[in-house]
Amino acid sequence: MRRTSTIKTLWRTLLLALIMAVVTTTALVAMAQPESASERTVTDMRGRTVSIPHTVDTLIALDAGSLRLVSYLDATDKVIAVEDDGHGRERSPYEFFALATYRIAYPALRSLPSIGSAANHEGIIAANPDLIISSATDVAKLDQLEKILGIPVFGVDVDVELYDAERFYTQNEILGTILGREKRAGELNGGIKALLSDLERRRAQVHDPTRAYAGGMMFYGPADLLRTTGDFLPFDLVGAVNVMPTNPTGNRQPYMTSLEDLIAASPDYVFIDAANINLSRSGYQKNKATLDTLVPAFRDGDVHTTFVYKYYGTNWENQLVNVFYVGSVLYPELYSDVTIEKKAEEIWELFFSVPLSFADVCEAQHVVPERVDWFD
């Protein structure tokens, strides 16, 4: 009996040793192998962990602003399909395609196949991209989309403003790595840093800040001159006083104010976003007598138009062009070396890697940064 017990104990020991050897060997093999020969793990701009192919050859960008970021990195050759919105396929009597400057730089985007919208899961799956880039802000929505599609979904932040330049640079760097455009991301970030440094040098020389108002902002649809913003980057970077407060919700986005608040703010200069120039003109004409009497900017005819800033997300490139234009209007002595036509072309080429003509963009977007002709 004792001998049988000893044999059983011996067998148990041998079996346990064998199991431990297998487990150890498996663990060592796993440790010796890379995470994946074909994938890398990255953290997107919403804090999600995403497994992405080491080489991304094809992609689809969903929702406002995401395709603009891809264009900044000169990676539109990887885009295999686009949404209907803004690409000449939406059911609208208006022509919106050129209001986003990246589409002027890369007109071939218009001829790409359409997947309709982010809701067309079957169409996206059929297109079979290596990667989806989405500007959706809801993490649960991004997770669900990735699960449904079976395709990696990288979330980008298109609400980031150049107030938070470091986050903007970081996003460019991550996208540059993912898309194999590291050098391009470095060039873009370096160029933006140089522009901001130049603007800071000029702003430091402002000793008597001018009071100004931004109106006619395009943000989730058209509006007249009463859609304003308290966080207008051109005013902040050139050293002007924005007469309006920030959005009460705290998101720094445009919002509707009232005629009474505009009168009370009493700006010396007004800048109107070109996207809503016609509606803003109508709003002015409706209240012409009041505005001309009570608001210095209208009384003196110091009302100017600027390039489209908010259309299908933030137009960061036009935002910087507007900074230099606003600076040249408010502080001409500090910007006497700046020709807005040349500066705009310089900034567009920095962002898009292709030359754009100032005249062509103005014609396409139906705007020239200048004093409006409402008073003539």
Image (cartoon, rainbow, N blue to C red):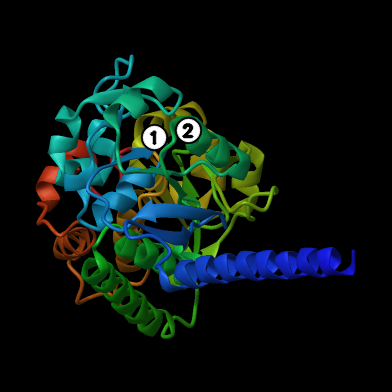
Position of 11 relative to 307 (above/below):
below
Position of 33 relative to 271 (above/below):
below
Q: Quadrant of the N terminus?
A: bottom right
Q: Which residue is mark 2?
A: 224
**Residue 111, image quadrant:** top left
**Residue 98, image quadrant:** top left
Number of numbered discs visible in the structure rendering: 2
Query: Going by the picture, which residue comes out furthest to the right?
Result: 1
The amino acid marked with disc number 2 is Asp
> Quick one: SS at disc 2?
loop
- Mark carried by residue 276: 1
Report the front residue among 111 and 247.
111
Position of 145 relative to 315 (above/below):
above
C-alpha separation, residue under disc 2 versus residue under disc 1: 6 Å
Q: Are marks 2 and 1 in contact (CB under 8 Å)?
A: yes
Of mark 2 and mark 1, the one earlier in the sequence is 2
Q: Residue at x 53, y 48 (%)?
A: 295
Left or right: 105, with 170 as reference point: left
The amino acid marked with disc number 1 is Asn
Report the front residue among 72 and 26.
26
Residue 363 coordinates in the image, percent (x, y): 15, 39
**Residue 134, image quadrant:** top left
Asked if one can make out residue 210 in the rendered structure from this viewpoint, the answer is no
Asked if one can make out residue 288 in the rendered structure from this viewpoint, the answer is yes
Mark 1 Cα shell of 10 Å, populated few (<14), some (14-19), many (≥20) = many
Residue 79 coordinates in the image, percent (x, y): 23, 41
Residue 83 coordinates in the image, percent (x, y): 32, 28
Q: Residue at x 26, y 69 (%)?
A: 182
> Quick one: SS at disc 1?
helix
